[in-house]
Each structure stands twice: as structure tokens, then as C-alpha cells.
Amino acid sequence: MSKNLRVKTSKFIDETYKVSFKFNGTTYYGYKGDTLASALLANDIHLVGRSFKYHRPRGIMTAGSEEPNAIVQLHNNTSRTEPNVRATEIEIYEGLEASSQNCWPSVNFDIGGINNFLSPILPAGFYYKTFMWPANFWEKYEYFIRKSAGLGKSPTETDPDIYEHKYIHCDVLIIGAGISGIMAARTAAKNGFKTLLVDEKSYLGGSTIYQNSEQFKINNQISNSWLEKEINEIKKFENLEIKTRTSVAAFHGYNFLLARENLTDHLPLDQRINKTRQRLLKIRAKKVITATGALERPLIFDNNDRPGILLSSAIEKYANLFGVACGEKNVLFTNNDSAYETAISLYQKGINIEAIIDNREEIDSKLIKETEKNNIKIYKGFTVVNTFGYKRINKISIMQLSKDGQKVVGSKISIACDCLGISGGWTPAVHLFTQSGGKLKFRDEDQVFIPDIYPSDQISIGSCNGDFTLDEIISSIPNKLKEFLNIKKTDYENLEIYSSFNKSKRNIWLLPSDKVIGKTKPFVDYQNDATAKDIKLALREGFRSIEHVKRYTTTGMGTDQGKLGNMHALGIISETAGSKMGELGTTTFRPPYTPLTFGTIVGRNVGEFFDIFRKTPVHDWHVKNKAEFENVGQWKRAWYYPKDGENMHEAVQRESKAARDSAGILDASTLGKIDIQGTDASEFLNRVYTNAWSKLAIGKCRYGLMLNEDGMVYDDGVTTRLDENHYIMTTTTGGAATVLGKLEDYLQTEWPELDVYLTSVTDHYATISVCGPSSKKIVSQVIPELDFSDESFPHMSFKNAKIDKIKCRVMRISFTGEHSYEINVQANYGKSVWEKCMEAGKEFNITPYGTETMHLLRAEKGFIIVGQDTDATMTPIDLQMDWIVSKKKYDFIGKRSLYRSDTIKDDRKQLVGLLTENPDEVLEEGAQIVADIKKSPVEMLGHVTSSYYSPNLKKSIALGVVRGGKNMMGQKLIIPMENKQINVTVADPVFLDKENKRLNA
Amino acid sequence: MFVINCPFCGEREQSEFKAGGEAHIIRPKQPTELSDDQWAEYLFMRKNIKGIQFERWVHTHGCRKWFNVVRDTSSDKIKAVYKMGEKPPSE
Amino acid sequence: MRNKYSIFSLVKNAFSYHENWEKAWKDPEPKKEYDAIIIGGGGHGLATAYYLAKKHDMKNIAVVEKGWIGGGNTGRNTTIIRSNYLWDASAGLYDHALKIWEGLSQELNYNVMFSQRGVMNLAHNLQDVRDLKRRTHANRLNGIDAVYLNTDQIKKFCPIINTSPNIRYPVLGGTLQRRAGTARHDAVAWGYARGADEMGVDILQNCEVKGIKRNGDSVEGIETTKGFIKTKKIGVVAAGHSSVIANMAGLRLPLESKPLQALVSEPVKPIIDTVVMSNAVHAYVSQSDKGELVIGAGTDDYVSYSQKGSHDIVEGTLNAILELYPIFSRMRMLRQWGGIVDICPDASPIISKTSIKGLYFNCGWGTGGFKATPGSGDLFAHTIANDEPHKLNAAFNINRFISGDLVDEHGAAAVAH
């Protein structure tokens, strides 16, 4: 049966609301308002986890987000499981289940604890020096290393929770709702600024709100009651939004910040359903006030990591805020006045204090005198040299410090205890400031880094700016706010402050020991088990930069990102290397400030919202008719339409045969369409396409090939001259947006003198292509008043028409080699026109076909697909399309590149047709092509780009690119597969109807 | 993420824009007169400056206009914006 | 030979509380003159120095580094190593590197933790499938171990991938190179530094190059924050800062330096045992030995030396991660950072002489240079020592941008990383 260490009611804890929770399988009780850590401490549980490397027992060290040790797995083996949750942050709720991590079989008996005994041969970086023999054995070692590393366990089920994003624009963002943040918020709000105040905690007021002591007064009121009134005041402002449980994760340039608002993690599981778990706030603030406070420093001495050792300020917080004693025999160890504040708080609550160890010799602040009044024994000028107790501290040894603080003298004194509070002074929380690009300066007097140069419109106030005491904070803030917000006055001028805190501090980064350092374990990074001797070893081995030391020892690389120990690491480096702290610099504080859930960053962009999908106007018809779809860019395109259990091959064979025998219909709406108008439209086309456009007659269509400036084929499509100064260009489906972007770029930046206007009309038109020998009959029925005779409407021409009263454009163009028409109609009529064509085509067995059949049909005809038969290394000459490259035009995009020494070579890869020896054997697209398989290394001449079985030609056909292929017509080549070689013959890429009889039929 | 002051639309989030590389590289008027070396200079060689760079951006999800930006590439601070064809501000 | 690293030396040193380890590398003052100077103390630069000393008997050389060695892209990348490149030239280059990786820990007596856990590249559309098959066939004929996997085989090799056909961009297939994997980035820099130092190479940290002194068409030395240093050969391996050094010599390069971001999660027990890369939905992920998920994001489209990128890129990457691994939704990002990557128009590197005698450049590695470190160092050392390229880096000359004979890996290979 565990003890109850709840000492006194606190108004932050609702004692009428009992909450049960499980830790490592055992049920405990706490109260609403508790964190998991405070509830465990109330049950006298300190041992929470095991450390990363040595698997040493570890307890609760802090009371906030800087916690390195007390991290747990929540709801193991469920969909809501979460690793590495800080017990000091999670608020308890009915049904919470937490378990210790990184230990097996249990936190009480952990096999991995053997590492602690092997620690002499596991110094920093030991893994760089071993595990190298036998060679190739690394993966076997690695298997065990990986198993023993890691902390918690990844979830293995899909997350049931939802997350969202919210954009916030405000005049003033205030980060941190401690006393400084509250004062700033009231001032900003009162002066009419749209203000947002955020704090990571569930309550407002920071540490002052539980500073209930006669030693700290504002205008003669105890500081916490003064602040409470201020908080009540700020809640009245309509232009001030307050968000608690909201942690700023990242402070980027241009005052762009990311914050995580936690909405449900404190609720019982059954109350979370269908609620947003966390919200990512994307904040753009005109001004930012950082009031993130300071973090208490630990002290670095031998075995400073045992369960029962906490920061002194954490002990105070557990007592004052949660009404929990961390121990029954408490000892405090300090180098400054903070521990006395804790001592007085504990004393007031009747919690026993055995002693205070202070490394300072001469101290006489009011706070200390007050403590001494209470008969608490103070050892002045002493240091702790060791601690005892495996799973919970039970004793410490202390010794007197030499005058210079470099060594210990005299004899050891033992003090029994079950809790040790340590205080090494305070480190301003400058993480967000430096993330934003701010530059720090080092203040020698108390060995802290404080903000110096601000990179954007922002300030830091309060203890994150190095103003630690109540009087410093309150006296500095009014002027800072006046200047920053450009206002005349604040409500905080001439406040009367009483603070008995004295700033004196004796900073010793690594406290001396009676043992040689090699025999000690003074932890600097608790989670990663990096000790002061590891840092010294790194320096000894030549790692001099702070970043080197950090990486070699892994100091500051844990889930707490070194919030506690980074300063000590720097201090020990500078002392050992004999360099000055300020010159050494700091390591970079990288975002996020506290770890940020992936789901929160992603928000709603998961599942069906991962990416939009674009549907053609005929999409529903395709779905209804059981089409299979292919992703082409963001488009869903009908791929093929299987009938009665057909597989893709069977469907495609049927579709392509029908298209050539009678009629096929294709939804080509996804092709990019750019409307081009202006008096210089023809000249513009001349410059962007390789061929000439000036002489294209109105009502005629022409195929164009567009190059990149590097001469490589970029896009292709048919452009129609609708009028003197009006063209409609089609692009590939995937290229539509980039082609438009590129054309606009040239138009605006290179050729602003051209009178040309471009408009994307891709989504405005449905494009229906009807092809095959019966196509003319079908479209004649759909548009009876139009003259479809070959004389009036030859191949590559266009006519305006009407279907009923709906205007449409009809082009006679073909991508299949068949006689074919393309009807372009306003998108919302697309489906009905499609259905009309289907109806009219019924008697001709009109067959809808998808992209796969389209690819097959065009391959029979030897038409290329940009992106499939080309790969950004093919020129039009390589494609054997010399005919489309105008020799007469002075210039066009990419022209000059066609005449570079490499691009004019004769033996470049060129597009050819390929026929297999066995006409039934279909080549694999992507297969390589060689001439001599025996050569070693084998020389690859090219590859198969497109390959199909043609039902119309009754044989396998393929397109490919082959080095020098242009001059290899009829030559035999080899396709070497894993298990066989396929013989092919180089052929003309046009397999069907070279004379264009079908086109013009 | 930057806030870019589009000369046509005003201040907008960077996500509305696309960068277009170094500015004031003029496409040669007579490419065919150039040697391979000279053409490669235009095509590929870039100053890639660390410091004040003159560069092109386009307001893709806005007015779709191209314009120029003066930006310090070492701090990402934008110093000025100006329209295509306008004279660059002197530093 | 100084302290040899082994389990025995660890045990031996344990008795003296590890007080007697020697420096892994010295911290010398610059000499007045060197036979060659390497600018840039990243993995590639240190490897270059190592091979110059080891294979070309050039011992009087220095590596100058503006900050601390391995502090640039070497220490910021996601450590993927593979050689399954499409073009012959690339395959030759990267497989040369991969072969050195396979014995590197032993060669350097420094555990670089080369873990051949395999790299998979996923296909999400039909063109991806064609491209990956094309690459696999080319790899096989080039003697590179690569196989094409169908969706079921992918699921079997890496069960946590969401291979449902109902996701927005379903996994249609992919490739696997089993010899590929990851290594410990810092160890590569430190191992080469220790090896080079041992052979007499001076590693000059906190030494920033301020100018390159030329005499007509030859180099004469470098101006640094530690004074002028004379030399006849300069090898520049400055990654994102290549153009800055080139400008000092009056050269322009076909490079743009852009932000590239990466992130890690909090550490967890082993959950993914291979490296998975997806280009179409842009996500790649592996798990470090420490247990962190190591996730690479993409580049921004603007030039920047700020080592910061935009949040949209990180968000887009995690969108893709959760699309492919929905189980990671409750994992948390621990740290994100940015590097500066120098990108060539054809996404292939330059390992080349220049028009200035004695000035050599090794740059343009873009987002994927780490994997090439040993090979790049070896071939660059050869190029500097012999004043002509090795046949394996001949194609990566700077003149290809003039002739047009590019090694276009981003147009053709499915993934650029």
C-alpha cells in the first residue's frame, strides 16, 4: 500500500473530483487538476522510467515540459497509444493508463540495467571504436543495439483522432502567460491591439500564481493575489484572445509562428470522440512579445540522477500548486536563493526539511534569514559529493568546498533523505528567440545568455530576458512595452514591490568531488546518459566545437533537447578548454520547442484530403460504366472499361479493335487548353513552337512541339486557329499548368512587347473524341446541321457548331490515326453530349475506350507521348521528327540548344519501332536494348518506351530509343531480361497506315 | 515563410508565389550568333549570390504577374520589390 | 600507429578511466605552403584529402574549414546510401562509392555504421512503374543489385507501408536495392579526418577562405582568416557555398543553392527496418539506430544560404508520410533543420578541372551527395593528383553544360535523393 503524500488542499486541485488511473498495471487515484507526475508523487511513486543508455532508474525531475526522465507510454497496445509522453505535462483523466518505457521485463527489474555495470567500457562514442570485427557483422550488432535503444513504442494502428489547422493574424502575440505575459497582454489589449495570449499550461499566471508568500508582494498584496486580479481584468477584453494548453512550437522568420493547441488530451477517452484532438495554429503576428520565463538549472555532481532528485522549483510547484510533498525527508541543495523560496513554501505546508546545502559561504538575504528562523539547518559552503539508493535516493554525502570552489575539503557528512531538491540558478528560455534568428549575448555576472539582437519586430520580457526577480520584472516591463507598442503609458508605473530574493549565486558548472572524475557519474544530459566525463573525453579526443561535443556525447539530443543540461555542457567545455563562455557560442536551438505530433502538422490533409482529385465532366458516366481509373497528375482518367469479368488486356484488345473497326469514344477533357488571343498571337506561337504558324489558315489545326530552352522536348499538342488573332492550344494532361506558367513567363519577362493574352480554359470545356470509320456518321447525327463532307471539313480543320442550342467547337484531328472528331463543349454539357454520341453510335458499336487503348492506338500509328517516349533528354531530331523543326525560323525556344556539339551528334538515342521475333511476345516497357550481350560490361543502347500487343496488326509492337537507331533500320537487337533474351528488329515507328489512308478516309 | 509584397496585390504569404531564379538574365536576341560557351552562360551559369540577390518571383496563386525581388539570401530578408521592366533599386 | 580502436582498447582504457585516449585529429596552425589545399571540411573534402595522402602520396596538404568539420550537409543529411542510378555514368560513380562503403569501417578503423538494410523506391503511377522498371533493367545490366517488387512483395518487405489500393496514390510497385542502406554521418567525417590526420594532413578548422589568389590562369594560394597560404592546387568541395568560392576565383558555375530540410521524430523501438523512398508523394523515411524516424523533406525553389526552409515543405512531407504510414500520426517531430544544397541543372554532380589551372571543383551534389562520399573523395583525389579525371568521373566534367552532354538524373531517374 503506497503512502498518501497529499499535504494540503490547493485551489488548483479539485478534491471533490477523484480520478482513477493506472500506472504499470496498478490502479491509483488522483484529483482533477493533477498531472500524471503530481498524482504519482502523491502516491509516493518516484521511479517512472529507465534511462536511454545505461538503463538507470529514473524519476520525476521537473514539473514542466523540460522533463528529461519521467516519460511514459500511454495506452499501450491501443490505437491511442503514444510513446515518450512527459508525465509532468499530461493531465490525468479517468481511465488514463500509463506504463514505463525502455525497460524489460519491468521498470523495477530491468535486464538492460546491466549496461550500468558495463558503463566503464561504454564511454561517449564507444560505438565508433568497436563493433567492427568481424567485418560485415555490423548488421548483427546493430540488431541488438537498435533493440536496446529507442524509448517508447511506435503506434501500430491508425490514429482515430482528428487534427486541424487554423490561421491567425494578430497585431500582438504574447507567448507565455506568466506575470510578464499577463502585464503585456493587459497593456496591449487596453491600447486596442488585436492580441493573442498563449500558454502551454492549463492555467494562467505562470509560477507567480502559486507564489503564496509574504516574501513577495506587489502594492502590499501577496504576489499571487495581485496577479489573480490582473488575470480577471484581462479576461474582459474583447480584442484579447487567450489560449491555454497552447504551446508555441516554432518561431520562424517574418513573425510566422506555429503553435499547438491541445484540445482533448486532458479529457476522458469517451469524451474525445469526434472532437478535434489538436489544432495547429499558424500565426502571423505584426509584433511578438516573448515571455516564456526561465528554466531552473540542475547541479552537476556524482549520481545526480536518482529517483527522488528533483529541481527545487519543481518541489515548490508540487507543494504549492498540487498540494503534494515529494518526500518526507527533504534536503535542498543550491547555489542561489531559489531553494529558500522552496524551503519556506514547504515549511508553511508542514513538510519536513532536513537540511539545505548551499555552496555559497556568505549569504545573508532576507529570505535566508527567514528560513533560518524556522530552524532549518543550512550547510554553507558545502557541496553534495554523492548520493545513494538505487531506485530511490536514501542518503547523500556532503563535503565542504575549498575557497576557490575547485575541490572539496574536510570530511564527509552523510544526511539521510528521500528527496533532494537541486537549484543551479536560472536559464532564460531563449529557445524561441534564437529560432527566430535572434542573436544572444552572454551575461558574465550570473552566467546566462540573454537576447541581444532582434531579427524582427519582437521583444523578450521578464525572466526569458534575464530579469529574474519580481522587482526587476515589474520595473523593466512598463518602459519596454511603451517603446515596443509605441504607447504613452501603462498601468504598471510606480508599483510598490517587496521581494526578499537576493541575486547572489555561486556558479560552479561541475561541482568537485572527492573521487577522480573517471569514477563518478555526474549527469549533464539525463535522458541520454551523457556525463561530465563524457564531455571531457570528447575534448580530450580533439572534439572542440560545441556541436562536435554535442554530437559525440549526444548531449542535448534527447526528447527534452537539452533544456536542462545544455548550459552545463557549455560551461564544462569552456572551463576544460580554457575558453570564454560568450565566445564559445551556443548550439542551435532547432524547432520545435517541444515535440510536435505529426498528425497536428498534417491536420486534415490525410486520407481523402491528401490531395484533391480532378474529375472530368463525364466522370460520373465512367464510374457508372465500371471504368477502372488511372491517376494522371491530379486527374482521374478512365483507364479501361472492363466488361463481364474482362481483365485489362482483354478489355483493351476489345476497345482498340472496335475503335479501328467502327467507332470508339474517348473522354479527352483532361488535355490542357490555353486560349491565346492578341494581334501577336501568331508570332508568339512561332516563338514557342518549333514549327511555323504564320501561314496557318483560320479554321485550321496544326500539331506543335514545344522545347525547353535546353532543346529537349517539353510538350506537344494541336493548336487551332479560331480567328485571325485567336488560337486555342492543347497541351498534355500533365503539362497543362507548367506550360501555361512557362508561356506567361516568356510573355511577361522576355517579350512584353507582344500583344498576346493567355487564359487557361482546361476546366471550361469537355472534350469528346469520336474516332473510327463510323465516326463521321455518328457526329453527323449529333450535329445534323454541320457539313461533315471531306471537302468542307478535311483532316486538321475546325468548325463552330451548335448541338441543340449549345455552342461547340468541332475539330477534325486524330491521335489514333483514325478518321476522328473532337467535340469541345462547355463543361457542364459534357456528359449530355457524351451520352448523345453514345446514343447515336449505338448502331455502330461505339465503344468507350480509356487511356490504355488510346496509348495502344497511337503507338500503332507511331505517335509519341511526351513523358513516356521522351524523358527530358530527347530532341525533336532524336524523335526523328526533323520535319517539325523549322529551318527558316530565326529563333524559337530551344533552337540554339539543338546545335550544340553534343546535340548535333549522329549517334544520339533515337526513337525507333521494335518488332519482336516472336510476334506474340510483348516487350516490357522499360526493358533495356543491347546489340552484343557478350560484351562486358554490356553496352546498353537504349530502352523500350512503349509496348503493346496490337489486335489490329495481330502482333506485338513497341517503340524504343536506341543509340544511333535512325541508321539501324532492319538490324537485329536483343532485349536481355532476367531469365531470357528477346530478339527484336529495328523498324519504322509507324506500324499502321503510313500513307494516312485511314485518317483521310 | 516570407511575406512578399506583390507590386500588384500587396503583402501576401510566400505560399502564393513561386520563385523564378536570378533576375536580369536577358535572353540573347540572336542566339544563333552565340558560341556554345556563350549560350551555356545564358542557359546554365548563375551568380548564385550569398547576400543581396536580384531575383524573379511570380504571384502564381494571385495575379499571376512576374516581378522582381531584392533579397538577402543569407538572411532571407526582402529589401525591395519592383515590377518587370522597372529599374532595379540601387543598393 | 596511434591508438587503434577496438573492444580491447576500450577495455584497456577503461582501467585508466579513458584518460589516455589521443586526439582523433590535431589542431595545427597553418603552414606557409601546401602541395594541395582542399577547401571544405565535410565528408567529401576530408575523403579527398585522405585519398590524396593514401593513394597519391601527397602528404603535405591541408583541409581548410570555415566552421567545424562535418558541420555542413555531412552532418545534416538523412544518410541514405544507394547506387541504383539510371545512367551508366551515375551507376559507375555511385557503385564505386558503395563498394568502398562496404569496407570503410575497417579501412578507417572507425565504425561508420554502414547498415545495408536495403533501400526501396516506390512507384505511384504508371509512368513511375515504367521508370523504375527501366532503371532496374539498367541496374541489372550494370551489375548493380536491384530488383523490381510488386505491391505484395513491398508489403512483405516493409509491412507498415499502407499498400491499400484505395489511397490517393496507391503503391503500384517499387524497387529494392539490398546492398543499399544508411551510415552514421558524423562518423564518416570524423573517420576520414582521423585517417587523414594520421598520414600528416593538416585539418584547419575555423579557417575561412576569403580569397583565391591567381596568377594569370593559375592559382597561387588562398587568403584565409588565418592568413595567406600558398599552394598550386586547390580542390573546392564547399557544397552549398561552391558558388561563393567560385566567385572569388572569377568563375561562374551552373549551380543554385537551395534550402533542403529534414526532421527526426522522438526515438522509439525498431518499427521500420529498411529505407523507403517515394518520389511521387515526396516522402522518405528510415529509422536511426537510436530509434528516431529520419525523414527527408524537399527543397524550396529559391536560392538561400540561411539554412532555413519554409514550413510548407515540412508539412507537405509529413502529409505524404502519413499517407504512406498512417500509424505514425501520433509520433512526434523532435527536431527539424535545414541545409544548403547546390543543385546542377541535370541533378548530377561536377567533379572536374576548371579553366583555371590548379583549380578543381567537386560540387553540385544536390540532395544526394552523402552516399557518394568515399567515391567522390577517391575520384576527386585522382583528378587533383593527375590533373585529369578518372574514367569514372570523366562524364561529370564542367564542360558538359557547354556541349549539352548532360547526365540527366532528375528527368529520368525516379528519385533524385
Image (cartoon, rainbow, N blue to C red):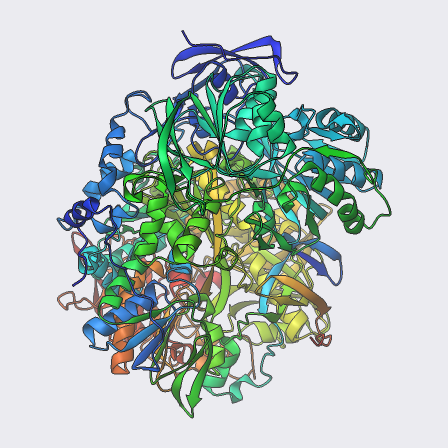
Q: Is residue A695 visible?
A: yes
Residue ranking furthest to the front:
A410
Q: How many marks?
A: 0
Residue ranking furthest to the bottom:
C216
Q: Tell which of C89 and A223 is nearer to you.
A: A223
Q: Tell which of C384 and A859 is nearer to you.
A: C384
Q: Tell which of B69 and C238 is nearer to you.
A: C238
Q: Position of residue A67 (x, y in %)?
A: 48, 32
**Left or right for A677, reference A671:** right
Where on the picture, by quarter, is residue A248? Answer: top right
Tell me the quadrant of the picture where the N terminus of chain A can be found: top left
Q: Position of residue A559 (x, y in %)?
A: 44, 38
Residue ranking furthest to the right:
A488
Q: Is residue A663 visible?
A: no
Q: Reply above or below: A914 against C186.
A: below
Q: Reply above or below: A326 against A28.
A: below
Q: Position of residue A596 (x, y in %)?
A: 52, 37
Q: Reply above or below: C94 against C165.
A: below
